[in-house]
Amino acid sequence: MHNIFVVGLGPGKEELMTAEALNALDSCDTIIGYTVYLGLLGERYKDKEFLSTPMMQEEKRCRICYEEAMKGKQVAMICSGDAGIYGMASLMFEIGKKFPDCELTVIPGITAASSGAAVLGAPLNHDFCVISLSDLLTPWDLIEKRLSLAAQADFAMALYNPSSKRRHDYLQKACDILLQHIEPERPCGYVMNIGREGTQKFVCTLKELRDTQVDMFTTVFIGNSTAEIIDGNLVTKRGYPAERKNNE
Ligand code: SAH
């Protein structure tokens, strides 16, 4: 049996990778991933063989993993954040049906919801959901439905893929749907370049968020009905008795 690692790198810097991920990559001959993520790896793995395909050629990238593993190499497929959260883990399993002599070991990474929440304060500290605004693989109707129902169910939210060149107004469209159920003053926030050079955090209201332009390296957070901005941090409260007393 040939083992292949599917590794989540976390948001960017090595300190935010798990020890298990670092050990797995140390043991590899070949590391395969989208070029940008290979660039994040830096000096530590400079002696490894790096293979890549451009964005949108994900199936080919997965097949290369299996083909290289079949040659007897220890291979890792890398993804940013967690490989099982808008990552390559599922496609690796699907393509793996054709390679019965290979098995996968998925190694978790810190996803942007978690690393971004830490930068912003504690925005997800109650029931929350993660919604991607990318309609490349999900019909926009379904994204709208999820946004609307999540707002009605009072989930705190992390929004991934809030924008791209082609989808520059998607965050605005998403906020318009949320505003059908959530008051315009609702505390929100967003974090750019989490765990990378140029990390920036912002807190704002939902109304202000609607009129904000963000890029694709941004994760957006929507507070639930208990959310409050405390000292510049976005905090979703857990409802401890002490908090309730203070509010009385
Ligand atoms: N597998 C990744 C998510 C990939 S989808 C994970 O678990 O984090 C890509 C989206 O994730 C981006 O559009 C952005 O919304 C978010 N994201 C990933 N890395 C980020 C980072 N370093 N800073 C800010 N947002 C990030």
Image: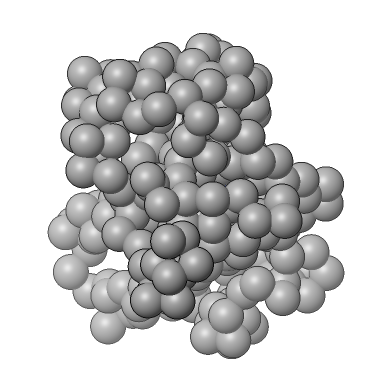
Q: Position of residue 234 (x, y in %)?
A: 59, 52
- In the image: residue 80, left or right of residue 2: right
**Between 122 and 61, which is closer to the camera in this rendering?**
122
Q: Quadrant of the N terminus?
A: bottom left
Q: Position of residue 163 (x, y in %)?
A: 54, 25
Quadrant of residue 190 in the image? Answer: top right
Above or below, comparing residue 152 to residue 238 in the picture: above
- In the image: residue 94, left or right of residue 105: left
Q: Quadrant of the C terminus?
A: bottom left
Quadrant of residue 11 in the image? Answer: bottom right
Of all residues shown, which one is farthest toward the front? 248
Above or below, comparing residue 194 to residue 181 in the picture: below
Which residue is depicted at the point 37% across and 76% down?
241
- In the image: residue 176, left or right of residue 147: right
**Between 237 and 177, which is closer to the camera in this rendering?**
237
Which residue is depicted at the point 35% across and 29% down?
182
Q: Is residue 79 visible?
A: no
Q: Position of residue 170 (x, y in %)?
A: 46, 18
Above or below, comparing residue 160 to residue 42 in the picture: above
Q: Is residue 232 visible?
A: yes
Q: Position of residue 167 (x, y in %)?
A: 50, 15
